[in-house]
Amino acid sequence: MARVVIVSNRVPIPGQRGPRPGGLTVALGNALKGDGLWFGWSGDISASADTTVRRTESNGITYATIDLSQEDYNRFYVGFANSTLWPLLHFRLGLIDFKRDDLDGYFLVNRTLAAALVGELRPDDQVWIHDYHLIPLGAELRKLGVRNRLGFFLHVPFVPASLFVALPQGQTLLRACLAYDVIGFQTDEHQRDFLDAVKQMLGVEPNQNGFLETADCLSRSIANPAGIDARAFAAMASKAERSSDTRRLISSLVGRALAIGVDRLDYSKGLPNRFTAFGKLLQDFPEHQQNVSYLQIAAKSREDVSEYQSLRRELDRKAGNINGRYAEFDWVPLRYMTRPVSRSSIAGFFRKARIGLVTPLRDGMNLVAKEFVAAQDHNDPGVLILSRFAGAAEEMEEALIVNPYDPDEISYAMHQALIMSGEERQDRMERLRARVFTSTAEAYCRRFLTLLAAAPSRLNQSASKHNLA
Ligand code: ADP
Ligand code: F6P
């Protein structure tokens, strides 16, 4: 069997720091077995432009990384990836802060990564590249003569062509996608929007099966929803139920229902509206005052990007307002924390919650929704409140589906969840669980890699055909 090489901006190097929250590494946990390679940025910034590849071995897997210089980090990660592509791909054109210099930095880092990776590759490796940071990496590898099968998966949404067209050099990025043999999206909608953009902006007409054929390449686009290791998460939740953290949380609730949200502190996650909705619940349905506590765990993320700093200030203010208005001397309605919490404690908390709040304004998939479902106890399950704009909503219609832009709708869904009968909760949760335990991380990885292995070889194609210019 060909070796699998995963390439992503973040690499989960074993034993290095705490794990960083993020769906990508959760979904890919299963892709590498035995003799695999995971390549990307070390997460470190080096003083000079030192691109030495550092390697760590663990369980037969090699983790190979390079550092970024401060300038690369600013232009590539803080700049183009997270101040242009992230807002664009989450439908937030107004938040884009585009700079030509950042775009140059983005291409430069992709070129640097390609040059470092090429020396690590074996001729029959299957290379699977991930997410919006690395869109041009495949084309850069082709320029260096790499003929391996190359796959790409976009973990975030793709936007309609009418929005994508606003991206300076958007055509160049789209053309770079054609260097891949397989291009994967989380949902049918994202795949459709991508194909539409390719048609309108490159004049390439997809065939009925999502194949894009030009004079010099054949790329296949697919929708392939990312999942979690549901069995492992369920087992962790069941064990964590008896842990000291979960017991401390339960005793602090003194019989009140728990609503929980777990997200990176990111404007795509819809946290201000969620806080407003909780305030409205207490105002419009006063019977729930003193009877429910909402715990929001929001891991700090991308703190060097200014939009994330203003979001944090906004949430601090909103949390203060809600608690100032409704708290009693023995009840704090909203518990808002940005300190890290372990995955196992989160699993235990999910199992004990009556409501799981997952209300992003846009999300590629949202694996928290799947983790909440996997953690539930069949005998007394909670209710998932899910944004219709999370990719997960395509597969999870038995959740209470809400429009995250409407705090009244979220607040009404919370009320419904709090008064819902045990029978209805069980019925909805059983159906959700059936899907989460089938559409797993393993199924996601297996399907992508099977299609990649089946792609026609590019051995006979010439390097010059994949130039970005
Ligand atoms: P994203 O990739 O945009 O962060 P996902 O919901 O797909 O969104 O994945 C987030 C992953 O990170 C999940 O596995 C979740 O459990 C984890 N996570 C999110 N927030 C936290 C947090 N505050 N503490 C610990 N883990 C978190
Ligand atoms: O899942 C989306 C994603 O952007 C991943 O690519 C990324 O690793 C994760 O969120 C966390 O973001 P960051 O790497 O910027 O901390």
Image (cartoon, grey):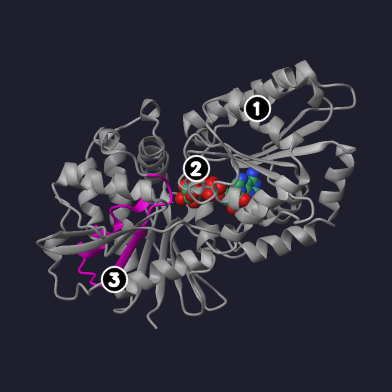
Q: Which residue is mark 1?
A: 411
* Mark in front: 1 vs 3: 1
Q: Which residue is mark 2?
A: 390
* Mark in front: 2 vs 3: 2
Decide which of tag 1 and tag 3 comes sooner along the chain. 3
Q: As drawn, is 203 to the left or to the right of 22? A: left
The residue at 60%/44% (across/down) is: 399
**Magenta-colored span:** 133-157
Q: Amino acid at mark 3?
A: Arg
Decide which of tag 2 and tag 3 comes sooner along the chain. 3
The outermost residue toward the top is 325
How many numbered badges does the structure rendering display? 3
Q: As drawn, is 297 to the left or to the right of 83? A: right
The residue at 89%/22% (across/down) is: 329
Q: Percent x, y for residue 149?
A: 29, 71
Q: Quadrant of residue 311?
A: top right
Q: Percent x, y for residue 408?
A: 60, 23
Q: As drawn, is 185 to the left or to the right of 358? A: left
> Neighbour class for label 3 at 10 Å: few (<14), some, many (≥20)?
many
Q: Quadrant of residue 410?
A: top right
Decide which of tag 1 and tag 2 comes sooner along the chain. 2
Label 2 near ligand 1 (CB < 8 Å): no
Q: Percent x, y for residue 387?
A: 54, 38
Decide: is 266 above or below 35.
Answer: above
Asked if the residues shown at circle 1 and circle 2 are in contact, with their CB atoms under 8 angstroms apart, the answer is: no
Q: As drawn, is 260 to the left or to the right of 36? A: right
Q: Which residue is mark 3?
A: 149
Q: Percent x, y for residue 207?
A: 20, 57
Decide: is 191 above or below 259.
Answer: below
Label 3 near ligand 2 (CB < 8 Å): no
> Neighbour class for label 2 at 10 Å: few (<14), some, many (≥20)?
many
Secondary structure at badge 1 equals: helix
